Structure formats: C-alpha cells, structure tokens
Image (cartoon, rainbow, N blue to C red):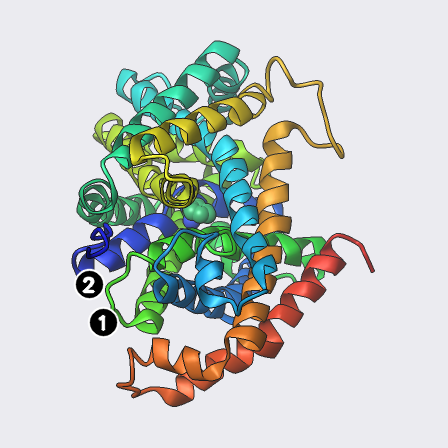
Amino acid sequence: MSPPVRDGFTSTFGVLLATLGSAVGLGNIWKFPSLTGMNGGAGFLLVYLLATLLVGLPVMIVETMLGRAARADAISTFEQVAPRGQGGWQVIGWMGALSALLIMAFYSEVAGWVYAYVVKAMTGEIATTDPKAAGAAFGALVSDPVASLLWQWVVLGVTGGIIMLGVSKGIEAVTRRLMPLLFVLLLVLCARSLTLPGAAGPGLAFLFSPDLAKITPAVVLTALGLAFFKLSIGMGTMLTYGSYFRADQNIPATATRVMFADLSVSLLAGIAIFPAVFAFGFEPAAGPSLVFMTIPAVFASMPGGTAFMTIFFLLTAIASVGAILSLLEVPVAILSERFGCGRKRASLYTILAIAFFGMPAALSQSLTAGINVFGMNAFDLYDFLSSDVMLPLGGILICLFVGWVYGLPRLQEQLGNHGSLQNDGLVRGVFFLVRYLTPLLIAVVLLHGLKVF
Ligand code: PHE
C-alpha cells in the first residue's frame, strides 16, 4: 500500500506567498513600530537589521531545510533527522508548540483589536488627529472585558475555520491574494504621513539617525526577539511549513526574498507612522496603542479617509490571518499527524486551548489588570516569554542540531536541491554561521539581556 498523499503547497509561487503570509502580520504593522518607538528609534532598527541578517536569515534557512528533509510535524521531524537514541532533540518541537500557544494567546487579542477597528473605522468613531481622543477610543476598547473577549473569539473562529480546510485549500488560497494590496495602501499612507506639515524631518530622524547610547543589552535582546518573531522562526512554524515545501524549492532564495519583503513592509509601516507621531504630538513610546492611535490620525487628515481607514484595517486583519494560520499549523500538525487526531478535531482542540490561555491576555487591561508576574501582566508576559526567551532558545537548539549533529554533507544535499549543487560556497557559509557564530551570538544576547551576566 502506498502511503497517503500528504497535503502540501502546490506551486513554487504559492510557497513563497504562504511563507511571506506567515512572516508579514501584526509583527510589521503593530509590533515593529511600537517596539521601535519604545526602544529609542533608529538604534533599535539598526540592531534589529543586524539580528535579522546574522541570526534570522541563517536560522530560517536551516529550520525550513530540516522541515523539508523530514516532511513531518515539528516534533516528529526530529525522529526522522536525529540519529537513533537522540530523542532529546524533540524538545525543540514541544517547546515550539508551547510557544505557538503563548504567541497566539496575545496575538489573537491584538488581531481582535484590529477587527474591532475595522468596524470603528467604518462608523468614523476613531477618525481623530487629537492624541487625547485617540487614546480614549483605544482605552475604551481594551478596558472593556466583554468586547475584548468577544473580538478574540471572533478571530479564533475565523482562523480556526480556515485551518480546518487544510494546507493547499486553506492557507495557500487565502494568503496569496491579498498581500499586494496591503503593500499599496501602506505606500499611500507613507506619502500622506511624509507630507504632513513639519512631519518628515523629526519622524525620519527618529527612525533613521541612531543614537548609540540608547542601545542597552535589554534593547538588543528585544531586537533579537523581534527578528525571530518577524520571520516566524525558532518555534516550529518554519519546520512545519518547510515540510510542505516542494522538493525543488530553492530554500535560501525563498528565505532571502521573504526576509527582504518582510523588512520592507515593516519599514513602510515605520515611515507611515513616525512622521505622523511627531506631526500630531503623539508619544513615540506609547507602546501597543501607538499604531491604533496614529494610523487613524493619518487617514483622518486626508480626503476619503474613512474609506481608506476601513480598507487598511481590513487588510491588516487579513495579514494577521496568514500569520495566525501558520502559528496554528504547528500544534494542528502535531495533533493530527503525531497523535492521529484528525484535522478537524486537532484544529478544535488548538482553538480551545488558545481561548483558554488567551483569556488572561484579553482581560489584562480590565478584569485581571491587577495580576502581575515578574511585574508584567499576562499579555506582556506571554509576549516576553515567547519572543524574548523561547524563540531565541529554540533558535540556539536548531543551530546546534544542524551544525553539530545533522552535519554539512546532508545540509549540502538538501540546500543544493539534491545534488545539483550550484551554490556550495553559500551552503558552507550558512553552515559556518549556524555551527559557531549564530548560536553564540544568540546565547550572549539572551544571557546578557536577561541579566544573567
Ligand atoms: N511573523 C508573524 C508576524 O510578524 C508572527 C508569527 C510569529 C507567526 C511566529 C508565526 C510564528 O506577525
């Protein structure tokens, strides 16, 4: 009997777009601007760029490679590729599944705010350039426990429904259509923001002229965490997506394209937001609320703003879907393939687990506001534990596995697309990075950032 045909991405372009769909999301439009604002601007951006190139790209390449080599879920991957008796590497998959749940628990809440803002944009209720009014509108939403929970559940319902449909019909079909539109709208926003009176100078200086004194070990760790979060690496998403890659897909080229496209979306979001922040007198370090206040202000100051604002939040909601699907796919693949649960039931269990863990995050500015662990509410704690601790740790382990256990010959075979090795120098370069430099860099940043030394 031949084994059942495994679902997977159906075209090379589809792979690229689904991977891009995983990378591009609230990370670009919400997290990147708020972290950049809170961590001093250009210096943070500089460290983030370095982290993406020296850590993000090599980890993304080898993680995807392992997934395709094993063609299995994030835990079973290590059964396929680790030598007998070295089952311990499966911890990468377990930790990945846990990170996926933690990320989803707060990410689905932010997506819920975006959904809510689609409606609010339509009614014109958030169309204001006044920082006080904008802050009040956002505050009213996040401190309302019922609205917060309901919007989170709407997000979980929508994405849970799509994930049940499977890889080619669900993920690929949705993500390939809408990304280009978001890009165009961001360009429009940038143009408006840059032409606001008195905006371009201070906004661009904040974003592009670094003040090195502001780069502390904690800032470096945050930038590294963002690099992992942005490229969806260190937690099994790229292992799982890699397992659906076509055999002839050029992994280094795909990863590099996704990285650059992802960076450009973040930069566009930054250029759309920071000039407006200075023009209207918003606070760059406002944190998670920054985008929800600034973007409406930019739209409110242009003709046809209401319509554009609605479309913008709608596209952002759609962008978040691609990212959420890729997060869900990690536990769903594990439950359905490793534990034989059936895709529908696997999806349902995953959604229920997230709804449960997500509750304290959704309520962290209302009912559970007083409950803090390490001085953080549930929302911030989930974010910190996943992005700044677990993803970098997962990244170290993946690098060490490939560099010291998996080995160069197999890496050459996989990345050279089974023998047709045209870029051996590049493969050796990646191997050198993941064997020595990248894990060392992550370890130093992690330990230093957490004040271990
Ligand atoms: N990369 C996504 C974003 O920036 C978030 C994400 C993280 C998705 C980890 C999958 C895995 O929005």
Q: Nearer the viewer, residue 6 or 134?
A: 6
Which residue is found at the position 53% from the left and 70% from the top? Answer: 83
Task: Residue 278 in the image: state x and y as whole percent.
Answer: 50, 42
Which residue is found at the position 41% from the left and 57% from the top? Answer: 239
Location of residue 221 with respect to 371 vertically, above or below:
below
Which residue is found at the position 59% from the left and 22% from the top? Answer: 360
Name the residue that disc number 2 marks.
Answer: 12
Query: Mark 1 near mark 2, Cβ–Cβ under 8 Å?
Result: yes
Q: Amino acid at mark 1?
A: Asp
Residue 84 visible: yes
Is disc 2 placed on a helix, strand or loop?
helix
For the N terminus, the image quarter is bottom left
For the C terminus, the image quarter is bottom right
Query: How many neighbours does mark 2 have within 10 angstroms: few (below 14), some (14-19), or many (20 or more)?
Result: some
Mark 2 within 8 Å of ligand 1, using the beta carbon? no
Task: Residue 389 in the image: state x and y as whole percent.
Answer: 64, 50
The numbered mark at residue 248 is 1
Q: Earlier in the sequence, mark 1 or mark 2?
A: 2
- In which quarter of the view is residue 193 placed? top left
- Residue found at the far right of this picture: 453
- Residue found at the far front of this picture: 1
Mark 1 within 8 Å of ligand 1, using the beta carbon? no
Location of residue 234 with respect to 359 vertically, above or below:
below
Q: Nearer the viewer, residue 217 or 276?
A: 217
Task: Residue 286 in the image: state x and y as whole percent.
Answer: 58, 35
